[in-house]
Image: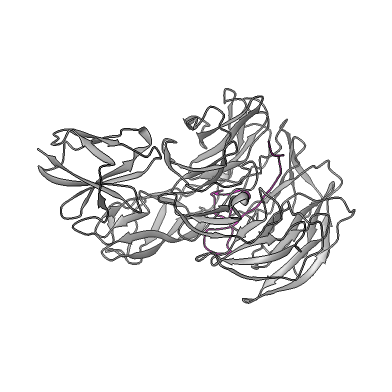
Amino acid sequence: MRSIIIVFSFMVVCGLAATAQNWPTYGGDNGRSGLSEITGPQDANQAVWTVTNSAPTTLGMAVYTFGDRFVTARTIFSPYTGIVECRSLTDGSLIWTSPFVTAGSILYPIGFTQDAVYVHDYDTDSLYALHPDDGSIKWRCPMLSMTFGAYPGCVFACNGDPIVNGYVYNSIFTMRIDKNNGDVLWTNNTIIAIMPCRDLAASKNKVYHLTGGISTPVRLTAIDINTGSSLYSSDPVPGDPDQENPIAIGPDGNLYFWRDNGSLFSYTDYGSGFTQNWDYPPQTNANIKGNIAFSADGDLYVQDQDVLKHINHLNGQLIHASAPVSMANASISVGADSTVYVNTGNGQFIAFSWDLQTIQWQLGAAGSLYCGPALSKEGTMVVTQAGSTIRAFRPDLVLKPVADFSVSATRIMSGQGVHFTDQSSYQPTGWQWTFPGATVSGSNLQNPANITYANPGVYDVTLHASNAQGADSVTKHCLIEVVQATAIPEGRVSDDISVIPNPATDEIRIVHNKREDPLAYRVYDLTGKLKAEGNTSAGKPVVDVSAFPAGMYILRVGERNASLVKFIKY
């Protein structure tokens, strides 16, 4: 079994702004910046809820959140197996537990978005997407991925496609996956320094890796996020041949990373290459493994042995340093009020003042090695630890909103309606939605319903939420993909699937004769209108057709090379 390694980070799916309140990947966002718009707990005197009957875990594992839910791994080492739990951020109640894919599955969540909970099986190196509502399998990627879920997480393209490590034994080191069906959209075979790899970050247009290895110099490399092509690399960056430390993208758009047994570096991507801005040497030659987090003005917080340091992002000069604190592989995040939250990696959470001179509170959490301080809806921070206990802490404050929302579907046919749900923190009382490209341009309802799009395309959505304390806006880019409605959906007539009974009256059962992988299915009438959709993860799913008008319908199973079968509804 491979050895356990480590990671941290943060940034938004499509830009360089701080994460609003969701924690889709380790450290929060694509840039792994650790910077949040959420104000976290003021103290750790009393948990807002405590779960004592969670599935046991040997170590506290990473927390990923979307809206009012979070997921985390529950992993034991003897025998080495793991499951994923999804729970409510509000009260900790269990919503679902992941299925055992195999008897020896070691499942780690590596990302959580509107579309799916992304899960890696460390036993088989398989990558899965689970439905956020019930944990059922949405798809399994046909290619393997060498990812260690306790730390690295994945990053996302603007439309939400996950980007992950590839399978080194097939000379695939990075790949982008179609969020809808698990197909591999591109692969990149530029060698990265160690597998599973933590040095993966993304901006709107590029993916960043530290490439190279034992016999090849380590360089900072930019990859086109849309095509997977390697664009350019820096000069060799001094340090060990391997590279286990993460990259982070600051609010200024610059890239920052510790080199293994080397210095802390700052680089600028100027569009066709990289310029080194500065380097900061550690206090000893020991390998630094902690992540990098940022203040709102762009300055850095880093672990340097047993000292937390505040570094000027412009010149790499030391601004502040904490008193020594026992730290192993610290994970760091920064709240909207500039509080610096640290999981020391030695079983303790510490909240520092912005200048690191004051410890505001401390919390013991035995075995909490991998749980980064995720700042989520309403300021909730979930703390996992060894054993069966999970706790949550949140501030007792009246604050302006932090805007957030979800949508009923992100991929629809032209003319199909979608519903939006406000998920903003801190109780907004006013809402203003903007829907570019929709048949209505906006709404002032809290939860607008049946918003339709007439023309194919990819569209942003913006929510402006307000209350007596102030206002906040969030734009989710590339959120809605609208495809052309056609009279006959694309696909091929196939004997691989069948419908029982056919003709049908109340329900049909989909029988998938060959492949066992879960696939998306859709039912259309002969005008091309979508009547039902789901996935085949249940084996032989049942579709309620009792409300369908009598007539002919088309069942489409799969995405690419989809199979079609017609059936009749009496």
Visible residue check, residue 396: no
Q: Residue at 66% across / 63% down in the picture? A: 250
**Does residue 195 appear to the left or right of 51 in the view shown?**
right
Q: Nearer the viewer, residue 324 or 54?
A: 54
Which residues make up the magenta segment?
Answer: 1-29
Predominant SS along the magenta part: loop
Q: Nearer the viewer, residue 116 or 379?
A: 116
**Does residue 460 appear to the left or right of 335 in the view shown?**
left
* Location of the N terminus (image quadrant): top right
Q: Residue at 62% across / 54% down in the picture? A: 10
Residue 521 horizontal/vertical position (percent): 30, 45
* Residue 154 is inside the magenta segment: no
Q: Residue furthest right?
A: 284
Residue 11 horizontal/vertical position (percent): 59, 57
**Does residue 34 appear to the left or right of 133 in the view shown?**
right
**Does residue 264 appear to the left or right of 451 in the view shown?**
right
* Location of the C terminus (image quadrant): top left
* Residue 9 is inside the magenta segment: yes
Q: How is the image coloured?
A: one colour
